[in-house]
Image (cartoon, rainbow, N blue to C red):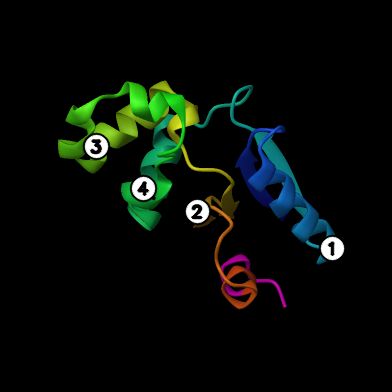
Amino acid sequence: MPIEVYGIPNCGTCKKAIAWLQNNNVDYKFVNLKNNPPSKAEIASWVKTLGSKPMRNTSGRSYRALGEQRNTWTDRDWIDAFAQDAMLLKRPLFVKGDRAVLVGFKASETEIKEKLGVS
């Protein structure tokens, strides 16, 4: 079963992650968040596994547009927001067998391999 990589094609970090997956011969499927946003149930499952904080794309316009009230939001509020605007999700987001295993691509090589189950 391939690892699903949620992102957008023009994202530099997503391109870096895809190149890494290819160089390590990892079977993956890229899912464009703009064209195929995840369901609220999928997002809720990911938040349960990873927490909402690491999943927040804090550098995007969508995040800044939320205003200060975002600082008091619960995970449920974030799930609703992520479901309404997938650009709020940090990219790339890696899903293995319906379970979110990693978000972003700043971890060490060892940690990335461990989280993705790559030897």
Q: Position of residue 25 (x, y in %)?
A: 84, 64
Going by the numbered disc 3, the residue's amino acid type is Arg
Q: Position of residue 54 (x, y in %)?
A: 39, 52
- Mark 2 neighbour class, 10 Å CA radius: few under 14, some 14 to 19, many 20 or more: many
Question: Which residue occupies 60% across, 68% down?
Answer: 112
Q: Nearer the viewer, residue 13 or 78?
A: 13
| Residue where numbered disc 3 is placed | 76
Instruction: Give whichever of discs 4 and 2 has the lower sequence position.
Output: 4
| Residue where numbered disc 1 is placed | 23
Identify the secondary structure beneath mark 3.
helix
The N terminus lies in quadrant: bottom right
Going by the numbered disc 4, the residue's amino acid type is Val
Going by the numbered disc 2, the residue's amino acid type is Ala
In magenta segment, residue 118: yes
Question: Which residue occupies 45% across, 37% down?
Answer: 59
Instruction: Give whichever of discs 1 and 2 has the lower sequence position.
Output: 1
| Residue where numbered disc 4 is placed | 47
**Spatial CA span between label 4 and label 1:** 29 Å
Question: Which residue occupies 78% across, 61% down?
Answer: 26
| Magenta span of residues | 114-119
